[in-house]
Image: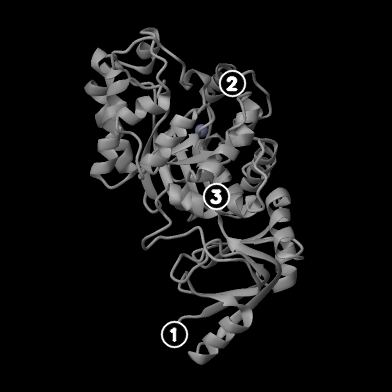
Amino acid sequence: MTAVTLYSAALVVPVTAPPIVDGAIAVRDGRILHVGERRWVAGSLAERGLDAHHVHWPGVLMPGLVNAHTHLQYTGMAEVGRGSYQGFRDWVAAFNPVYARPHDWALDSAAGARQMLEAGTTAVADIVTDLEAMRALHDAGLHGITYWEVIDWTNEEWVERGRAQVEAALDALPSPPGTGLSPHAPYSLEIAPLLEIPDIVRERGSRIHIHLGESAIEREFAHASTEPWQLRGLASLHELRQAGYGTSATDYVDHLGVLGPDCHIAHGVYMTEKDRAILRARGTSVALCPRSNAVIGLDEPPVAAYLEEGSPIAVGTDSLSSAPSLDLMDDVAELHRIARAQGYAKDDLAERLLSAATLGGAHAMGLDVGPERTGYLAVGARADLAFFDIPVTDVAETVTTLVTAGAGRAAATVVSGQVRVARPSFTEHTGVTS
Ligand SMILES: [Zn+2]
C-alpha cells in the first residue's frame, strides 16, 4: 500500500469550499484523498485502516498558486524591468536591444521556474520565444502550459513558411506540461496567422494565449464607416486603423475566431464594457498583470469592473523584463489595492482574488477539470499545495493578510505530492525538507 501523508494547518483554504479552521488534507500517490477538519480527516483514514505520516503547519495551507501569464525566458532581463516607461512603445525600445544580446535562455528560464516554485507556484502559463527556453516547465516538473510565441509574420511569409515553422515548433514542445500557441498580439501579426492559429491548436486539442488590450492602440474609438470591416479585405489591424476603423482589438480577434474557452488573454487593460462582455460570452479568461502594467506605464486594469460583471479572471506576474518579481502574491496585493481604489467595496474581495490566483488560473488553462485538475483542494485533484507563513487569527482577517501581505511568505511548495521547496521556517516546524 502506498504511503499517505496528512497535512494539517491552522487554516486550510480549499478555494472550492469555505476556509477550514484546524483543517487537513490527506495525500496519496500525488493526489488529494481527503479534505476537511483535521479530526475528521484523521478519523476517516483510521476507519479505512490507512496509516498516515502527519505534518502540521501552524500557518495557512492553500492550493499552489497558478501564474497565468509569464515569460520565464526573460528572467535574465531584470535590468529592463527595473526601469519605468512612458507606455508600450517606450518599453519595447528598452526591451529590444537587451533581448538582442546573447543569452543562455535555457539557464534563464530554469532560474525563472525555480523562482516560481519558491513563491508557492505549482502551475504556470509560460510563453517561449526561442526554442532553447522550451524545457523550463517540463524540467522543473511544474504543471501548466508551455506556449510557443508567434510574432511578426506578414500574410505572405506566413503562407510561404510561417505556418510550417510554427506547427513544427508546437510539435517539438516537451510534454508534460500541456502545450499551445501564443499569437503575440493583434497588432504584431497580420490577419492570416491570426485566422489559422486557432485551427492549428484546435486540431490538436491544444490551447491559445494572446496579449490583448495591453497597448492603447487596441482601444475602441468611434468611427464613421457603416460598412463592416470584414468586407473590406483588410490585411491587418494596422490597415483597419488606416482605413479609419475604431473597432477594438477584442472585437477584431473575436471575428477571426481567436477567442473561446480554450483561449485566455493577458492584461485586458484597454477594454470597454462591450469588450469585457465579448470575453464573457466566449468563455475567455483574462490574466491580470498589474505590476507589469505599472512598469510599462499603462493604465490600471479595470479589475473592479471584471469582478462586478463576473468575468473569469486569473493573475500573472508577466516576466522580469517588465515586473519586479515573479511572486504572484505581489500582483494579488496590487489587485486588492486597485479594486478598492476603483470602488469595489464588498467583503468578498480577498477570497475572490485568492480564487483568481489559483482556481482562476487553472480554469484559464483548462486545468480545473479532468485528470490533471489543479488549483483547488478537493478529492482527486493533484496535490499541488502552498504553505504560507501567515499568523492565523480570525478567518476573514487571515485571508485578507494573505492577500495583501502574502508576498515572500511561501514557506513550502508541494507539486503532485512532492515537497519541492521547504524554507527553514517550515523545516523547523515540521521536520520536512525538500
Ligand atoms: Zn507578456
Residue 60, given in percent of the width and then of the height, sits at 67, 64
Residue 211 visible, this angle = no
Q: Which mark is residue 1?
A: 1
- Dividing the image into 4 quarters, which one contains the N terminus? bottom left
Which amino acid is tagged 3? Ala
Q: Nearer the viewer, mark 3 or mark 2?
A: 3
For the image shown, how many numbered marks are present on the structure?
3
- What residue sits right under mark 2 in the picture? 91
Looking at the picture, tell me which residue is in the foreground, 347 or 211. Answer: 347
In the image, 363: left or right of 117?
left
* Spatial CA span between label 3 and label 2: 27 Å
Residue 90 visible, this angle = yes
Q: Secondary structure at mark 2?
A: helix
- What residue sits right under mark 3 in the picture? 356
Residue 35, given in percent of the width and then of the height, sits at 54, 74
Would you identify the image quadrant in which residue 334 lies? top right
